[in-house]
Amino acid sequence: MSIEEQVTLFILVALPIYIASFTLYVVRALKGPTIPDMVLAIDAMTYDLAAFLVVLAIFFRSPILIPVAIVLALWVYALDIYVAKYLEAKEMGE
Amino acid sequence: MDPAWVLVVIGEVLVAIGVFCDLVAAIGMLRFPNFYVRLHAATLGTIGGAFVPLIGAALIAAGCEFLGPYRWFTVGGALVTAFLVLILAPAGSHALARAAHRSKAAVVEPKVVDHLEEDRGGGGS
């Protein structure tokens, strides 16, 4: 078995598990009783989505997916900081 | 043995660990009782479920000849993303937990004792 076939087979096995865990995160993000619960679920899901995109970039042989993962990691950190500031001060800052 | 196989196998082991941590963290995120306990699941999901498979994906991409000359772009991007996740995920979780406790947005229920609340003069325990 060549490297290409082996890597493709491995990622094909890993993809459904990723999809299943994203589904569980989305359930918590939708029904989370408080705002920090929703933000925490979206937070963990988006970091995992960045890792998932890098794996997909290998699977589809398209390196153009890599900058998406970097931007996604930075964006969800900004979401955390904005929500934390809003919860403490009840305003979004200037 | 071809050195590319070594890189690919080590990377696949890391990605497998990451997938397992990801599934466990998602189940924990759904089943744990309150926000502060769910922070543990979030830690497992970010460091175990994002940082480790990103390093593994970088190793896989380094060993895959079929990705062409742009595979080093994939390796570098994966390493940069892994570094960002390692730095930003704990900082974001800390800021969120601190804000949730200070603003009382997340109720500590069920709880045994809350020393931080007592130190601020509120009714702990």
Image (tube, coloured by chain):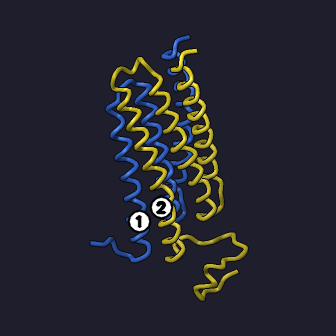
Chain colours: A blue, B yellow
Mark 2 closeness class: few <14, some 14–19, many ≥20 residues within 10 Å: some
Q: Quadrant of the N terminus of chain B?
A: top right
According to the picture, the residue beneath numbered tag 1 turns out to be A83
Identify which residue, B96 or B51, lies in the foreground: B51
The percent coordinates of residue B85 (x first, y second) are 46, 50
Q: Residue at x 56, y 38 (%)?
A: A20
**What residue would you read off at disc 2?**
B91
Label 1 secondary element? helix
Determine the residue located farthest toward the left in the rendered image.
Answer: A94
Q: Residue at horizontal 53%, vertical 48%?
A: A25
Give how far across and how far down residue A14 sits, in percent: 56, 30
Chain identity of mark 2: B
Residue toward you, B83 or B88: B83
The residue located at (38%, 76%) in the rendering is: A90
Residue B76 falls in image quadrant: top left
Q: Chain of mark 1?
A: A
| Quarter assignment of residue A92 | bottom left
Q: Are marks 1 and 2 on the same chain?
A: no
Residue B99 versus residue B2: which sits nearer the camera?
B2
User: Three-letter amino acid code at disc 1?
Assistant: Val
Q: Check if mark 1's residue and mark 2's residue have beta carbons within 8 Å.
A: no
Disc 2 marks a residue whose amino acid type is Ala
Does residue B91 lie above or below B121 as drawn? above
Q: Nearer the viewer, mark 1 or mark 2?
A: 2
